[in-house]
């Protein structure tokens, strides 16, 4: 596995962990309230901080580990294959991101709930980001 | 998994014939990462025309001595 492949895998897992944490708390709060919990900037900030911390720490650890291995000089290098993989992955991710934005918007038209719109947009972003990371890993392992 | 590209190559063979040149050394010489050299050798990635020429020049041979079409 290359540095970028491991990095995308770690980031994908970080997105899933942070996203699951966010929705677990929203679920718990909603059960306590008896209706959908309203968006809350503390929870949203905590989600972003956890996401950035997890991906930052994993890239830092990966960078250190790679620097000690034979692949040392390659750490952070980005070549033609990496660019092609990024292009293919981002192209497919853009469809998921569009879906993750349009579905909540259509939902909003029917339910008129701003709280639901906010949480579903976060869900769409989590889905798109996780898709992007795992598509990178998939594309690094396929032949083309 | 996607179908492998129909392009074959002798990169590994030529590299070994060149004083057991390492994958890292070849990667550095052509300006790609070692992972890309590994992918080329395994037939999982067809390099750009520029990289293909660079590989051929490193070994001092023609493009057709390095790359071929499956079945030819």
Image (cartoon, grey):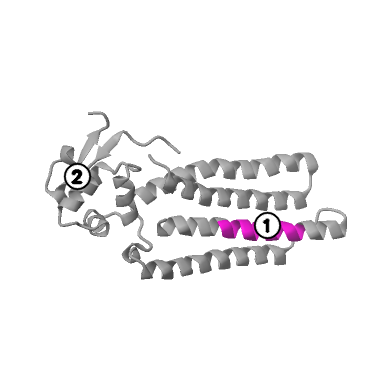
Which residue corresponds to the image point at 34% horizontal and 48% vertical from the top-left? B39
One can see residue A134 in this view: yes
Residue B42 falls inside the magenta stretch: no
Which residue corresponds to the image point at 38% horizontal and 62% vertical from the top-left? A76
Whether discs 2 and 1 lie on one chain: the answer is no
* Disc marking residue B53: 2
Whether residue A21 sits left or right of residue A31 in the image: it is left
Q: Name the one closer to the observer, A25 or A95.
A: A25
* Chain to which the residue tagged by mark 2 belongs: B
> Is residue A91 depicted above or below A30 in this figure?
above
Residue at label 1? A20
Secondary structure at badge 2 equals helix
Q: Residue A41: x percent and y percent?
A: 71, 64
> Is residue A74 depicted above or below B43 in this figure?
below
Q: Residue A49: x percent and y percent?
A: 61, 67
* Chain to which the residue tagged by mark 1 belongs: A
Secondary structure at badge 1 equals helix
Which residue corresponds to the image point at 64% horizontal and 48% vertical from the top-left? A124
Q: Residue B66: x percent and y percent?
A: 19, 41
Looking at the rendering, the stretch of residues picked out in magenta corresponds to A13-26
One can see residue A38 in this view: no
Whether residue A124 sits left or right of residue A133 in the image: it is right
Q: Residue furthest left?
A: B60
């Amino acid at each position: 596995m290359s540095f970028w492949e491991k990095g995308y895998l770690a980031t994908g897992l970080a997105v899933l962990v942070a996203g699951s944490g966010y929705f677990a708390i929203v679920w718990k709060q909603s059960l306590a309230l008896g209706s959908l919990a309203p968006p809350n900037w503390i929870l949203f900030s905590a989600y972003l901080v956890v996401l950035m911390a997890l991906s930052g720490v994993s890239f830092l650890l990966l960078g250190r580990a790679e620097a000690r291995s034979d692949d040392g000089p390659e750490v952070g290098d980005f070549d033609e294959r990496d660019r092609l993989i990024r292009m293919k992955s981002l192209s497919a991710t853009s469809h998921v991101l569009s879906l993750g934005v349009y579905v909540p918007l259509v939902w909003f038209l029917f339910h008129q709930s701003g709280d639901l719109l906010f949480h579903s947009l976060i869900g769409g972003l989590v889905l798109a980001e996780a898709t992007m990371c795992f598509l990178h890993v998939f594309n690094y392992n396929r032949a083309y | 998994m996607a179908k492998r590209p129909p392009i074959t190559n002798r990169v590994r063979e030529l590299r070994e014939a060149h004083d057991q040149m390492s994958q890292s050394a070849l990667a550095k010489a052509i300006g790609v990462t070692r992972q890309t050299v590994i992918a080329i050798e395994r037939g999982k990635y067809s390099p750009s025309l520029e990289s293909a020429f660079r590989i051929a020049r490193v070994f001092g041979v023609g493009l057709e001595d390095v790359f071929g079409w499956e079945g030819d």
